[in-house]
Amino acid sequence: MDSLISNAYTQALEVIGSVEPRIADATRQELADQRASLKLIASENYASPAVLLTMGTWFSDKYAEGTVGHRFYAGCQNVDTVEALAAEHARELFGAPYAYVQPHSGIDANLVAFWSILANRVESPYLQKMQSKNVSELSEADWETLRHEFGNQRLLGMSLDAGGHLTHGFRPNISGKMFHQQQYGTDPETGLLDYDAVAAKAREFKPLVLVAGYSAYPRRVDFAKMREIADEVGAVLMVDMAHFAGLVAGKVFTGDEDPVPHAHITTTTTHKSLRGPRGGMVLAQEEFAADVDRGCPMVLGGPLSHVMAAKAVAFAEARTSSFQAYAQMVADNAKSLAEGFLSRDATLVTGGTDNHIVLLDVTSFGLTGRQAESALLDAGIVTNRNSVPADPNGAWYTSGVRLGTPALTTRGFGHDEFDKVAELIVEVLSNTERGTTKAGEPSKASYALGDGVADRVKAQSAELLDKHPLYPGLVLG
Ligand SMILES: *Cc1c(COP(=O)(O)O)cnc(C)c1O
């Protein structure tokens, strides 16, 4: 298999290079760079060669607006096979009554979910007509009323600085403009979700949509409790599991921690911990299936058939026991990373982790998130800066660094390697000095890394990376 994969990519790059050599070069360089860096970005992973190869085919050329067996273009029989199989795998993998695999990204999946909730739940005498063939019977005044009804709904989601996503009602995103929005945060003392506070807010605000899920919260969520809150106030529970879908697929999150049986609608990306192609997906209870099915033409155009094919391949991988072992390792490794920090006196938001994310508060090093992110990158450690709850440095400079274990776990890192990663990060940050501005104030951006630190750390990471190569059998000729 290794030589097949090596040949496939070597030859593909030759073909690409014969047209635009600089793209072939950049593609080779990207592999070299990914191989040579400690990737701790919590939303990234390394998809398998089978998943990656599936994306590079003629399915990319096909238009297939519509749904399986109901297309607006001729010649979609093979796309039908692909989409039906991807959806079937998804339903089985997640135990969902219905799966919609067309969304191109996580944000698209959320837009599909928002519109299906509106279409399903906004009570309007015009709505039936709007969905039906009698749409021409709606007058301009009816449309005005509809716009008003649609645009006046309420959404309650987790705030960005507590770990929510910008599509959960953050003002700069369409979700924060289209809906009347309010946000729930985390307990200021513990950093943990306070379900009583969420419930109190929901009772007062009475949202149509309660959004659960996160991008930077290092803990598990009790989705049964979130559903209880939603039911009490008559809200639809939408869970965005974009970050942790791999832990759901891998059966690390089960029972109350598995969102799919509890949520009315669950959205996700497919490229983060799930380790598939870059894309999105919506899972829904039967009640919402017909509305979600109208994702195209509501907010989507033609599906990316080559990516749906790759989703089917990735879901087939995720059904295996080796994926389940991987998902468990992702969570175990996050614990090892957290313990590595705590044993070296670093500060973690919530004091630890029980998912795949560790949120390091870098203020104890006298740094902003921006300075920490840059210093770490100088030493070959790729992370992203992230707000901490009630961040004193705001959303741009921030006070935290978000770290995730899915990518390096794919390379085969285990407990000892993640303990070493914590050691290296602490070494970089404790040897980074905060710079000063021209006016002599402490700078939030400039910094100075101690002499020789970057090289020393890079040499030690190289040892870890060499021990666990990325795509081990893949040799480009
Ligand atoms: C990453 C993420 C998204 C967006 O996914 P894209 O594919 O980048 O559009 C949405 N929601 C959450 C919670 C995420 O973490």
Image (spheres, grey):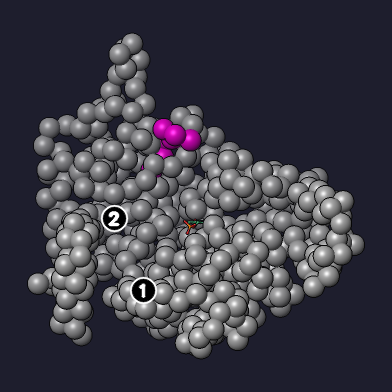
The foreground one among 127 and 407 is: 127
Q: Mark 1 vs mark 2: which is more N-terminal?
A: 2
Q: Is residue 99 above or below residue 333?
A: below
Categorize mark 2 by other alpha carbons within 10 Å: few (<14), some (14-19), many (20+).
Answer: many
Circle number at residue 39: 2
Categorize mark 1 by other alpha carbons within 10 Å: few (<14), some (14-19), many (20+).
Answer: many
Residue 62 belongs to the span the image colors magenta: no
Residue at image location 56% in from the left, 79% down from the top: 73
Q: Amino acid at mark 2?
A: Lys
Can you tell which of label 1 and label 2 is closer to the viewer? 1
What x and y, as percent, mark residue 278?
42, 65
The foreground one among 329 and 371 is: 371
Give the left or right position of residue 166, taking residue 36 as reference.
right
| Location of mark 1 (residue) | 55
Circle number at residue 287: none
Quadrant occupied by the N terminus: bottom left
Quadrant occupied by the C terminus: bottom left
The foreground one among 293 and 346 is: 293
Q: Amino acid at mark 1?
A: Met
